[in-house]
Image (spheres, helix red, strand yellow):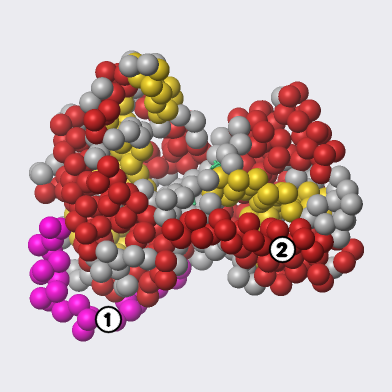
Amino acid sequence: MDTSDSRLVIVSNRLPVVLKKEGPRWTASSGSGGLVTALSPILRKRNGLWIGWPGVTDRAAAKIDPVLARTEEGFCYKSVALTAEELSLYYHGFSNEVLWPLFHDLQTQCNFHPDYWQAYLSVNAKFADTIQENIEEDDMLWIQDYQLMMAGRQLRDMGLDQEIAFFLHIPFPPLDLFLKLPWRMEILHGLLSYDLIGFQTQRDLHNFLHCVRSILEDVEIEAADSVHTALVHGRKVRIGAFPISIDFNEFAGTAEKPQVQERTAEIQKSMNTERIVLGVDRLDYTKGIPQRLAAFKIALERYPELRGKMSLVQVVVPSREHIPKYRQLKKEIERLVSEVNGRYTQPGWVPIHYMFRSLEREELLAYYQAADIALITPLKDGMNLVAKEYCAVNLSETGVLILSEFAGAAQQLKKGALLVNPYDVASVAGALHQAYEMELPERQRRMQDLRREIRKEDIFVWADSFVKALYVNDVAESPAVWTQDKNVPAGERLSQKPFQIAPLFGPAYHRAAQKSPS
Ligand code: ADQ
């Protein structure tokens, strides 16, 4: 089949549109963000379609479709209506209380409620229904992220044989953690229903292959340099690492604007400190904010020369506050901030400036630019775009990036960044001191290196390489993707030896799981 002209259909939990109600009328405008920026040109070229939940519950959603049809993107949107209950169990429940913590290695934060799984399946089926109703014969499908891992399986059960790709934006956990998931077999079978599976990093890819080899029978894996192949009952599933990135030129260009430059200078002046350290995160326990504050406190304790000279600006974007764990986290952050400030504030100098709100885009870029040091220390992160955005905006090329080794971005940025273990708060404090003392030539060399790397592998390279891998159905012709170490032969990078846990998963178990997902 010649697929070169096929239409591309993107499916994600949320549509990238901002809906507003003015009186009785709804209006829709295009959302911002890396994904929509990267995919819009491809969707326009391929006369594409984007399917997802519009962000309002089902009663309003009925009125949304005509509004979505009127947006001027050059491609179409189609909404999937969800009830408040579905949203609560599938999105807040299974997606954010089971998959999110487990896939970020934080198993103790999981709530494996059985009702969540049923809701996850039925909402994935709802997405599959909408896809089936709107898809045409030669369409290519690209499904996004952890909320929709079972949609492919449900589409196959409906008899759909189109090419379907899936990209996981969050990490894939190691075997020992994945085994804790009560629905591990179903999820693996679900993922293997896709034709192409993309992960953020080589580590996630290896974790997935290790789980497949250890848990499933009858799946053969052929390792290759870029995209690997799993043979699943005669079907070929291509699996690769495609690290997502940012629109480097757009970030750097916006940072050059006079109003951003002016605001940068204002921020620098108002902080009244020699070095500004910046942390920017959504409120989330995966971002390691309390550990970061503890590290900053240790830095002030151990290196008294930093007092009065180095301030931390911590921006936290409100998120998921209806979940008790997130409310507790907010309280913990506020307690730590006031403890450090209570102890070290001096006339005219404050150690931590804390903001709990979302910033306008240009304001955010001014903070990036004003910062001498970015302190980005998630306990685990799929990629972490903030790290890349900070570097793109650092036009002076004098900033220092301190980055968690558990952020996906660390694999690409390890040469220029100071990598830290976020749990080792004393060594994070040491890295802060090292960044404070670092001479200009070293800072420049590192930042130039970081910016070169990010410019070279921007969001368009990511989207293009993934879409090409989807359209070029031959592994040998698939575009090369970034790999951890190109000098190590693929066969050696991937352990060929399966980890044997077969007694746990005998034939009866496999037969039962194959019958799932209901
Ligand atoms: P997120 O968990 O949302 O994304 P991240 O990659 O850091 O994490 O992206 C956050 C985005 O929010 C950035 O683009 C940033 O500019 C924006 N932002 C941050 N602070 C802001 C503020 N105060 N005001 C306004 N905007 C702000 C998920 C995964 C990540 C993965 C991405 C992309 O969890 O690991 O990198 O998807 O695949």
Q: Is residue 186 above or below residue 57?
A: below
Residue 504 x, y percent position in the rendering: 22, 81
> Which residue is tagged 1?
501
Q: Nearer the viewer, residue 443 or 179?
A: 179
Query: Residue drawn 23% across and 70% down?
Result: 216
What whole-number distance in Å separates the C-alpha atoms at marks 1 and 2? Answer: 48 Å
Is 123 situated left or right of 241 in this image? Answer: left
Magenta part of the chain = 490-518
Reply yes or no: does residue 154 show up in magenta. Answer: no
Judged from the image, the secondary structure of the residue bearing numbered disc 1 is loop
Ligand 1 within 8 Å of disc 2? The answer is no
Q: Amino acid at mark 1?
A: Ile
Q: In the rendered image, which residue does mark 2 sit on?
A: 339
Query: Where residue 191 is drawn, which disc sits there?
Result: none
Q: Position of residue 438 (x, y in %)?
A: 84, 58
Q: Nearer the viewer, mark 1 or mark 2?
A: 2
Please tell me which of labels 1 and 2 falls first in the chain: 2
Q: Position of residue 179 (x, y in %)?
A: 31, 73
Q: Residue at x 69, y 58 (%)?
A: 337
| Horizontal arrangement in the rendering, residue 469 relative to residue 356 (left or right) | left
In this view, 293 is above or below 245: below
Label 1 CA crowd tier, 10 Å (few <14, some 14–19, many 20+):
few
The answer to whether residue 162 is above or below residue 381 is: above
- Residue at 21% x, 59% y: name it: 115
Magenta stretch contains residue 493:
yes
Residue 33 x %, y %: 50, 35
Judging from the image, what secondary structure is the residue with disc 2 in? helix
